[in-house]
Amino acid sequence: MRAADTFRFSRTALGAYPLRTSLILLAMAIGVASVIILTSLGEGARQFVGAQFRMLGANMLIVLPGRSETTGGLPPLLGTTPRDLTLDDALALRHSPAIRAVAPIIFGAASVSYAGREREVSVMGSTPSILDVRELQLERGVALPAGDPRIAASLAILGHKLSRELFGHSSPLGEWLRIGDRRFRVIGVLSSKGQSLGMDMSDMVLIPVASARSLFNAPSLFRILVQAQHQQALTAAKKDILRIIRQRHDGDDDITVITQDALISTVDDILRMLTWAVGGIAAISLIVAGILIMNVMLVAVSQRREEIGLLKALGAPTRQVLHLFLSEALMLSLAGGALGLLAGLAGNQLIHALLPDFPVVTPLWAILAAVVVTLATGLLFGSIPARRASRLDPVIALSS
Amino acid sequence: MIALQQICRSFQVGDETVHALDDVTLQIEQGDYISVMGPSGSGKSTLLNLLGLLDKADSGSYRFEGTELTTLTEEQRARFRREKVGFIFQSFHLVPRLTAAGNIALPLTLAGIPPATRNSRVLQALESLDMVDRAEHRPAQLSGGQQQRVAIARAMIMHPPLLLADEPTGNLDSHSGQEVIETLEQLNADGVTLIVVTHDMQLGKRAGRRITMVDGRVTADR
């Protein structure tokens, strides 16, 4: 039998039962569309979070006080609390050739007021290097002075949003505002950069680290952000940081260094797993669709016994009957798969239209997997009814 | 043309073994017109199914044009049915979703014959039936007589030498039945071997050779 004839024969057979055929197509399409949409959302989430992490700044290391892992040995009698990170620790890191910039950070919250308006915002004490490390830009004004960071200065740089809320559209440059119980002069405004990891850089005020130290009466640093010279220097930078701090802390490894890349790849791995898991769950609906195909095909085989007997009487061998029914199952699953693919991509467009900031990325592997699974479903679940049809005894089939 | 030697075929019905064919030996010549008569359950239909290789004998020999058929593989049996046998059924067995032309073309389609050849042969068949104007009708739109004539055209489209008809007029009124019988007899006159299984004495008497069966045995052969 010619392929075109097989195709036409199967098509008219499917067309003879429009409701049944369209229900199977629907089930198959829902299965494929859910695989496409869910994996696209998972992949989008992965890229979204990855981008968020990258916004922290390139080649960045984060130095935290305290150690995240324990080592063997007896617990010390008196117990040790980790030593605080100090500004001098941070300044010592500058000596490493692998390190380009060091930004010590003191973090706190204080009320900021200007001309009767008052807001409670985050206050970050740091050095001018923070702009490089976090890849921040100034919209107007100048950066913090580059002198000795141990010297306090009553200067402040406002986040974009904070500037808007306190000063409206007029320039805040040169104005004096009150942070906590001290007065600071505004020397710059940050350009609007998005929120990254819950830290909204546009809704905070940046002051010299020494000023923050006295404002919050906190001698120790919240953390130190370090920018390595380049990607390849990250490992060397991490080693240097550990070595320098160990020297300064009497041989104790009491800090934790996190590389941004390690952070990204961990989150990346987790989200990739999540995408696979979600895709796998959606694939279950494909299997359900496959069982539906099998069920409906079995009904079709028993309804078309007479026709099967006739085909055999007209000289169709077992193999040919098998092929005819398999091709019906394949056509169903492929057409359903194609519809599902279109519906899935359309759904992605819709999500993209509703959430323009969220990247909806359909991974190629998901499309390929959906197509392959669709084909396999058709063949697998179609083969049982097809086999049953082909083994029908023509005498019994024709006498019904 | 056909030589059956000691053919036996039995079925298990519940605890009982029913001998549908019990030691049947028959010679059939090319161009014969044979009617097979007998009461229900006498094995007439089984004989027809066996001659058309829809059924298999339990024992005995079936030679067709000198070839032993009982040892054929399933693939070879299908090929034999396709090329050597035309079946006519009491209930027509037309595919309801196909047009008259599509039903007639079905054996050609299954055999993989290209559409152009197919179409011209189907048109020829429709012309000889004087049913060209019904080509695109579906079975439900045709009368019983027309349906059976479409079925005859389908049976003859591969030009088989053997035509097997199981109660061909059983579902038809006498006028349509007459038409169908005349069509079949015309084919026989053109050289096709025709074997008709029937209850209808009137119809049975028309055949040149009349076989009567009782309980799986041939009791009369004139």
Image: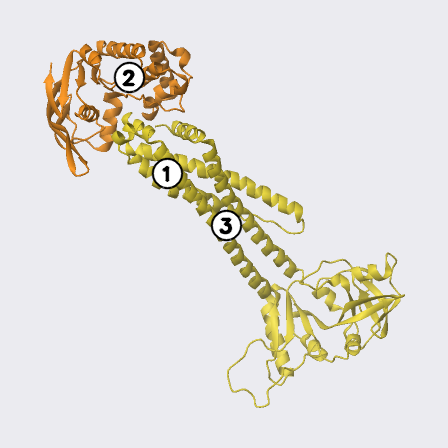
Chain colours: A yellow, B orange
Badge count = 3
Chain letter, disc 1 residue: A
- Of label 1 and label 3, which has the lower sequence position? 3
- Secondary structure of the residue carrying tag 3 is helix
Q: Nearer the viewer, residue B40 or A315?
A: B40
Residue A178 shown left or right of residue B120 in the figure: right
Q: Dividing the picture into quarters, in which one does residue B76 lie?
A: top left
User: Residues under labels 1 and 3: Cα distance?
Assistant: 25 Å
Q: Amino acid at mark 2?
A: Met
Label 1: how many Cα within 10 Å (few below 14, some 14–19, many 20+): some
Q: Tell me where residue A389 appears, x and y as whole percent.
A: 32, 35
Q: Residue B156: which disc?
A: 2
Q: Residue A212: which disc?
A: none
Residue A364 visible: no
User: Dot 3 corresponds to which residue?
Assistant: A282
Whether the residues at callouts 1 and 3 have beta carbons within 8 Å, the answer is no
Chain letter, disc 3 residue: A
Chain letter, disc 2 residue: B
Q: Tell me where residue B158 appears, x and y as whole percent.
A: 28, 19
Q: Nearer the viewer, residue B192 or B108?
A: B192
Q: Tell me where residue A107 appears, x and y as whole percent.
A: 73, 72
Q: Are marks 2 and 3 on the same chain?
A: no
Give above or below for B37 relative to A47.
Answer: above
Q: Amino acid at mark 3?
A: Ala
- Secondary structure of the residue carrying tag 1 is helix
Q: Nearer the viewer, mark 1 or mark 2?
A: 1
User: Dot 1 corresponds to which residue?
Assistant: A298
- Secondary structure of the residue carrying tag 2 is helix
Q: Tell me where residue A1 appears, x and y as whole percent.
A: 34, 28
